[in-house]
Image (tube, rainbow, N blue to C red):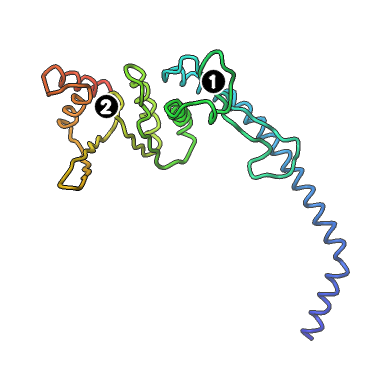
């Protein structure tokens, strides 16, 4: 009886195969239509966000010692509606650093330092909407100083509100924004180079910021400058 039922099921499957194929093909058409509708809606929303983000990042670049910096999120939308994981769009970041140069793909036209600052601007303005648990910056302040270094510190602080941020820096302005400052030193012990990392307390931070400011020795004026910098960076 079991065998008979199994054969009946196989026969039913064979006799209804054309109908099953037609039903499956109809489901595929419906699914592709839904994909196309949703993907086009996603493209529309991306275009709105791209315009807004382009303006914001351009402003941030100009504040980060790139006075003529321009940033544009470019969408290349495919006419082919074949379903893809990310919709119909290929997205590139185009930038221009100099006023006489056109916008080009960021990976081709920026230096390492510029790339670090542009990525910092992007991260600072999108950190609230991402789920990156930890961000590490290695000397993102390279080649800059003065008020620009303060702006770098403020951007890093903005990112740190949404994730753990580790920053390697030689800038006293940037270091003054951190919650915890770790002093890393190297010394030669015999034939070996030993690296140590020491978490600084409040008093040690003042002394280290003073040293980073260029003081050869700790003086009342250099210490006052360090304290003022730390006070202005309180958050």
Q: Quadrant of residue 149?
A: top left
Q: Which mark is residue 15?
A: none
Left or right of 3 on screen, residue 123: left
> Who is closer to the viewer here, 198 or 131?
198
Q: Position of residue 98 (x, y in %)?
A: 51, 16
Element under disc 2: loop
Q: Nearer the viewer, mark 1 or mark 2?
A: 1
| Above or below, 198 relative to 152 | below
Left or right of 182 on screen, residue 4: right
**Local crowd size for mark 1, using a 10 Å CA cut-off: few (<14), some (14–19), many (≥20):** many
Residue picked out by circle 2: 176
Q: Position of residue 232 (x, y in %)?
A: 26, 20
What residue is at 62 percent from the left and 28 percent from the top?
74
What residue is at 19 percent from the left and 30 percent from the top?
205
| Above or below, 190 relative to 124 | below
| Above or below, 38 relative to 170 | below
Residue picked out by circle 1: 96
Left or right of 62 on screen, residue 224: left
Quadrant in which the C terminus is drawn: top left
**Local crowd size for mark 2, using a 10 Å CA cut-off: few (<14), some (14–19), many (≥20):** many
Q: Earlier in the sequence, mark 1 or mark 2?
A: 1
> Who is closer to the viewer here, 99 or 31?
99
Q: Position of residue 178 (x, y in %)?
A: 29, 31
Q: Position of residue 51 (x, y in %)?
A: 59, 23
Q: How many callouts does the rendering have? A: 2
Quadrant in which the N terminus is drawn: bottom right
Element under disc 1: strand
Quote the CA–CA distance across marks 1 and 2: 31 Å
What residue is at 29 percent from the left and 26 percent from the top?
171
């Amino acid at each position: 009886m079991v065998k008979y039922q199994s054969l009946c099921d196989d026969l039913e499957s064979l006799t209804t195969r054309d109908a099953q194929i037609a039903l499956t093909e109809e489901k595929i058409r419906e699914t592709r239509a839904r994909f196309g509708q949703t993907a086009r809606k996603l493209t529309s929303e991306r275009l709105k966000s791209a315009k807004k983000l382009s303006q914001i990042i351009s402003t941030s670049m100009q504040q980060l010692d790139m006075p003529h910096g321009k940033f544009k999120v470019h969408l290349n939308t495919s006419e082919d509606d074949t379903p893809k994981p990310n919709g119909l769009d290929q997205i590139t970041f185009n930038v221009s650093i100099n006023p006489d140069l056109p916008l080009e793909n960021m990976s081709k036209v920026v230096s390492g330092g510029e790339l670090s600052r542009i990525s910092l601007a992007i991260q600072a303005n999108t950190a609230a909407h991402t789920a990156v648990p930890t961000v590490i910056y290695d000397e993102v302040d390279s080649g800059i100083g003065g008020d620009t270094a303060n702006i770098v510190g403020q951007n890093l602080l903005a990112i740190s509100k949404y994730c753990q941020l580790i920053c390697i820096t030689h800038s006293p302005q940037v270091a003054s924004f951190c919650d915890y400052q770790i002093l890393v030193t190297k010394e030669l012990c015999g034939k070996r180079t030993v690296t140590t990392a020491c978490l600084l307390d409040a008093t040690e931070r003042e002394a280290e910021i003073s040293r980073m400011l260029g003081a050869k020795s700790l003086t009342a004026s250099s210490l006052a400058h360090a304290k003022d910098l730390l006070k202005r960076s309180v958050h």
